[in-house]
Image (tube, rainbow, N blue to C red):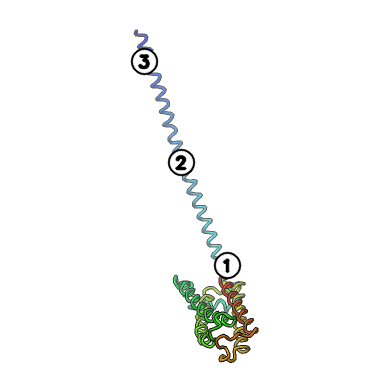
Amino acid sequence: MMSIVLAAASTAASAVAGAGGVIHAAAGTVPAAAAAVHATASAAAASTQSVAAQMAALTAQAEAQYKALQAANAAAHPILYWMKMTPVGAWVRNSEWAFPFLQSWHFIGMTMLLGVVGAIDLRVLGVARAIPLAPLHRFLPLAFIGFGINLITGICFFCHDPWVYAFNTSFRIKMLLILLAGLNALWFRLGVFLDLDRWGPGIEASRLAKVISAVSILIWLGVITAGRYIAFT
């Protein structure tokens, strides 16, 4: 019986000793794990600092390139630079509401202009022939007011950043089409629109007048399309 007790005690002592060894070994791994975590954190911090330094260097390089480009543009195109530096250009660039305000009025002016011009052109083409042309002609001052609004707001847009517009293909096409629209309107006024009293109800316009009016509508549709493409070219 005594031998059994001694054997059990020996076994228990061995188990305790083994557990103590395991605990000691586990305790020994804690500092190593802590050191590994510290090393990883240090490496991550160093990597973050390196990325931040690289980003700062790239930002500084981009700013330097932008300033150099602005200086070169100012030297090559002093008039454009002067327009950008005007109070109007600064106002459009720095104000949060200037651009949407100007866009709204630009669309209003375009609506006034094309509303009147479109009505006259459609009447010449034969739409609503019962309406005499002379009353429609009395709305032309509204068209001129609309054109004036577009001219003023357009200058403000241009002063915002002249280089965006001056070398933009869509903008150049728009300006060319506006010039053609003006010449076409002058041709209509001097060539076929000399006597308003002849253009009463039911009067059929001449073929030349219809051609000029059709060209006018196409030109103004081109103006609108080119204007919308300015932001995408």
Q: Quadrant of residue 218?
A: bottom right
Callout count: 3
Give the residue type at disc 2.
Answer: Val
Q: Is residue 16 above or below residue 226?
A: above
Q: Residues within 10 Å of mark 1 (few under 14, many from 20)?
A: few
Q: Disc 3 designates what residue?
A: 9
Residue under pointer 2: 37
Q: Measured from the top left, where is residue 211 in percent x and y?
A: 64, 81
Q: Going 42% across and 25% down the picture, which residue do you hit?
A: 21
Graded by Cα atoms within 10 Å as few (under 14), some (14 to 19) or many (20 or more), the crowding at tag 2 reads: few
Q: Assign a secondary structure to mark 1.
A: helix
Q: Nearer the viewer, residue 208 or 146?
A: 208
Q: Mark 3 packing: few (<14 Cα in 10 Å), some, or many (20+)?
A: few
Q: Nearer the viewer, residue 72 or 154?
A: 154
Q: Is residue 108 left or right of residue 76?
A: left
Specify whether residue 71 is in view.
no
| Quadrant location of the C terminus in the rendered image | bottom right
Residue 178 position, x and y percent, is 59, 79
Instruction: Tell me the number on the disc at residue 232.
Output: 1
